[in-house]
Image (spheres, rainbow, N blue to C red):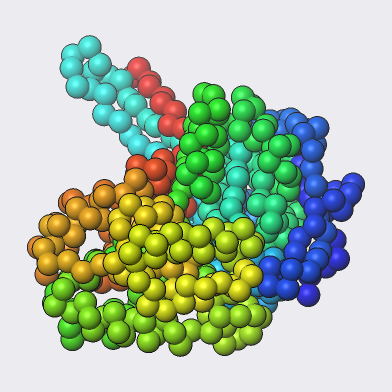
Amino acid sequence: MLKPTYPYYLAGRACAPNADLVVHDKYSGQEACRVALADAAVIDQAIAAAVASQPALAAFAPDQRQAVLKHCVARFGERREELAHALCIEAGKPIRDARGEVTRLIDTFKIAAAEAVRIGGDVLELGISPRSRGYRGFVKRVPIGPCSFISPFNFPLNLVAHKVAPAIAAGCPWLLKPASRTPVGALIIGEVLAETDLPQGSFSILPCHRDGADLFTTDARFKLLSFTGSAAVGWDLKARAGKKKVVLELGGNAACLVDGDQHDDLDRVVERLVFGAFYQSGQSCISVQRVFAHASLFATLRAKLVAAAQSLVCGDPKDEATFIGPLIDEASAARLQDWIDDAVAAGARVLCGGRRRGTLLPATVLEAVPRTAAIVAEEAFGPVVVLEPFADFEQALAAVNASRYGLQAGVFTHDLRHALRAWDVLEVGGVIVGDVPSWRVDHMPYGGVKDSGLGREGVRCAIEDMTEPRLLAIRG
């Protein structure tokens, strides 16, 4: 059960001036708890505190930062079930997926703890000509300064972790705006951080409405903005962010290729496709949305995939048997229903699913969908997958690239030439061979191209973004 109310964290301290933000149980629709809501004045105060804390946090030694991160790892482990059930309620995340996200939260803080004490530098050889003989060069990385973080609703723990854990490791003060529909997980992280000896003022976690959060984007005191969310919002924020560095992890309509040499492995391929398309109820930016399967195995794959999708339990996320829970709200479910209906009107066939009940949409498989249909061309962000056969591998690669998104792609093939060709040609941030694009490990460079974003997440990449190289040149 959730607590009745949660405070926000202003300059590292719990504050409960109100309980104005209502958080709903996404399955029942009932009020689950209330959360303190910050306004523009509070956000301004938090930014000032972050700026003031910068010298103390920069002087906070690497082993001290590591100790903070290790404390979080231990406490998250102790509170594992509490965190999972909070996710289950506030995000509607099936309990099995919720437990998996807690594991990734812990992994991300573990990785950051390891990186905190090995943020290195370089010795730079300057003697490249007679005029620079006798000079020595050194480069170290220093914290960039106060950071602004805006996180989405679909991974309320792990996508927060990918911002705050690297910031702690790098020595940067920060403000976080968690998604207003799923703020509780971030506030529990704040509760754990408040137990540590981080310098006063170095972090704030402030749920707020969009109309009160403009300072997170526009305030020049921030040196970096990291946003995870939709492409439309992300690119608008970048346009208004001014001179600060901007990192965007945005949406996608991830594709997966199944090559013609996969006949003997088709059961495993289907198992992974089902996971990739329907885990998290499809609410993942790297959810498998488009499947291109070789014509020689298309009919068999289609039959196996439909049978597997029909067997998935769609319902109460608190039930251990549930694989697909509710979408985040009814508007999202209604949008998906409209897109499915529009595709059918354009000639698509629904092989299973396709009809919502409130916020619940069962696993849905479509074929013969025009590539211009929204359910193919846009980000579905729900439990829907579209199948299409191909005869030529190069044409399949071109079909994957015929998208304004480019986050990750999956390729099932035993042909090394095809694997390397996909790596060379696909316009994405990552190519996953032998698995679905939904696969991610939390230390790898992660991000996209085109409308899918700018920059990379993954702890080491984030630390690089949150630090600047500083040169020292010495004349001997």
Q: Nearer the viewer, residue 462 or 451?
A: 451
In the displayed orientation, state which residue is furthest to the right.
17
Q: Nearer the viewer, residue 13 or 387?
A: 387
For the N terminus, the image quarter is: bottom right
Q: Nearer the viewer, residue 423 or 377?
A: 377
In the displayed orientation, state which residue is furthest to the front.
345
For the C terminus, the image quarter is: top left
Report the number of numbered marks. 0
Q: Position of residue 18 (x, y in %)?
A: 89, 49
Quarter-of-image position of residue 222: top right
Q: Position of residue 55 (x, y in %)?
A: 66, 32
Q: Taking 314 as reference, is 74 left or right?
A: right
Q: Is residue 130 above or below residue 97?
A: above
The residue sitting at 26% across, 56% down in the picture is 400
The residue sitting at 45% across, 51% down in the picture is 251
The residue sitting at 33% across, 52% down in the picture is 372
Q: Position of residue 166 (x, y in %)?
A: 53, 49
Looking at the image, can residue 225 be seen? yes
